[in-house]
Image: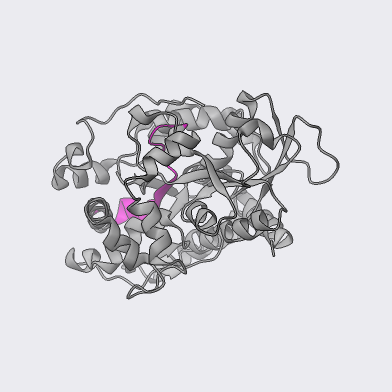
């Protein structure tokens, strides 16, 4: 069954952490831990979703050790609240976080942490009940998002407004025909909630969209990467103290993640197996088959999704999920602008004071990833043109 009350509690817990008062005790624990353990090993925290792929591949393939770093087995956490708590308190020091969540962390709670790289691009979709034929059919229904501060919430609200629908966050009461209720739900709860008709759809990272398709309980209505071309979903977040006081260590961490991204692009089927519940390290509870649907989709999938209009922009040549590490400033700037017009719960007033260009400079520390990309063969190694700028392409 869908655990809506638990999701609500998790949301409130996370909302408290992303305030100055709520983050204070955790950041105090971080400082104390850093003082007693200045040479801490790589401690990865992750959720069991494909967003974590580069961090887990780097661990599985021994890239951290090869770089001379001590590393502990990655810590699997069950919610964004648990992951953020572990990171802010210093229990883990390398995590993947939803890109909008890092903005909330740094400017909502003044967390001393920065984005050092992108973890992956695309890798998410809007999945709906089989009877939903188009976005307009969601009027009067409920759709789940993983968190308010997520690219998923930003994209789905854009999609709804384009169809004349009004996203609402109200918890109770009847919905008007042109309203769509958005709720926060843990990703693992989404497919069961869709199957039991508690929700009409969900927008989330993989492999939950692929899982819903495999179970015949839902269909992909639109891939988010077909709305915002090659958007970042999760990014690599690290403590600012490590970036300044352990620069050489931080460089090796980022080098290892970038190396893992290149390996995953070249070995997607092997990546699916090592991430699965039957892999050596049992990183996730997912089967290799469902992960393969995401990481190494069958050639015929493209035609099927074009016919269903889950993919409209075939000329974008966007992969279901892809991996490239450079955090383009234009993306961060556009994300800040769009968050300002997205309905959010929690401590949101700080967004109004944020200058997009400032956030792109201040939130992101790209020194290390630029070095890593150069060592890996340049941007062309990821199938991208050289240079560190791009224009954002968003077509709802």
Residue 270 image position (x, y, % from top left): 27, 63
Q: Quadrant of residue 121?
A: top left
Residue sitting at 64 percent across and 51 percent down?
A: 15
Q: How is the image coloured?
A: one colour
Q: Is residue 131 visible?
A: yes
Q: Looking at the image, how many numbered discs can be counted on the residues?
A: 0
Q: Is residue 233 magenta?
A: yes
The answer, for residue 239, to whether it is visible in the render is no
Which residue is at the front of the view, 217 or 135?
Answer: 217
- Residue 51 drawn above or below residue 159: below
Q: Quadrant of residue 138?
A: top right
Whole-percent x, y for residue 383 in the image: 22, 38
In the picture, measured across the screen, residue 347 lies left or right of residue 296, that is right
Q: In front here: 367 or 393?
A: 393
**Left-right relation of 197 to 280:** right
Between residues 35 and 271, which one lies in front from this camera angle? 271
Q: Name the residue: 66% across, 42% down.
A: 347
Measured along the vertical axis of the image, is residue 41 above or below residue 23? Answer: below
Query: Quick check: is 387 in the magenta stretch?
Result: no
Displayed quadrant of residue 26: bottom right
Image quarter where the N terminus lies is bottom right
Reply above or below: 200 against 81.
Answer: above
The magenta span reads 227-247
Q: Residue at x 25, y 59 (%)?
A: 249
| Residue 38, image x, y percentages | 34, 66
* Residue placed most toward the observer, 253 or 127: 127
Residue at 75% from the left image edge and 29% from the top image edge: 178
């Amino acid at each position: 069954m869908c655990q809506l009350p638990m999701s609500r509690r998790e949301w409130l817990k996370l909302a408290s952490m992303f305030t100055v008062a709520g983050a204070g005790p955790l950041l105090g624990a971080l400082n104390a831990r850093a003082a007693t353990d200045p040479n801490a090993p790589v401690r990865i925290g992750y959720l069991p979703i494909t967003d974590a792929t580069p961090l887990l591949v780097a661990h599985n393939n021994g890239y951290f050790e090869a770089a001379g770093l001590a590393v502990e087995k990655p810590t699997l956490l069950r919610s964004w609240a648990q992951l953020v708590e572990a990171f802010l308190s210093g229990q883990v020091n390398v995590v993947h976080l939803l890109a909008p969540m890092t903005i909330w962390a740094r400017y909502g709670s003044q967390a001393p942490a920065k984005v050092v790289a992108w973890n992956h691009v695309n890798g998410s979709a809007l999945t709906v009940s089989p009877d939903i034929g188009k976005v307009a059919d969601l009027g009067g229904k409920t759709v789940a998002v993983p968190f308010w501060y997520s690219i998923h919430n930003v994209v789905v609200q854009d999609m709804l407004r384009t169809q004349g629908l009004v996203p609402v966050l109200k918890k109770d009461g009847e919905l008007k025909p042109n309203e769509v209720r958005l709720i926060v739900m843990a990703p693992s709860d989404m497919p069961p909630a869709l199957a039991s008709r508690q929700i009409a759809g969900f927008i989330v990272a993989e492999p939950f969209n692929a899982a819903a398709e495999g179970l015949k309980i839902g269909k992909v209505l639109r891939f988010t990467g077909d709305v915002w071309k090659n958007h970042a979903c999760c990014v690599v977040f690290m403590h600012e103290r490590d970036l300044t006081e352990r620069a050489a260590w931080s460089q090796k961490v980022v080098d290892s993640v970038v190396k893992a991204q290149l390996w995953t692009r070249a070995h997607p089927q092997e990546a699916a197996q090592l991430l699965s519940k039957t892999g050596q390290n049992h990183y996730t509870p997912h089967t290799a088959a469902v992960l393969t649907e995401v990481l190494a989709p069958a050639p015929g999938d493209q035609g099927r999704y074009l016919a269903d209009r889950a993919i409209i922009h075939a000329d974008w040549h966007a992969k279901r999920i892809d991996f490239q590490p450079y955090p383009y400033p234009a993306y961060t700037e556009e994300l800040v602008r769009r968050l300002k017009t997205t309905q959010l719960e929690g401590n949101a007033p700080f967004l109004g004071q944020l200058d997009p260009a400032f956030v792109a400079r201040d939130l992101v520390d790209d020194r290390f990833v630029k070095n890593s990309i150069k060592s890996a063969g340049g941007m062309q190694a990821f199938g991208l043109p050289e240079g560190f700028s791009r224009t954002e392409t968003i077509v709802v």
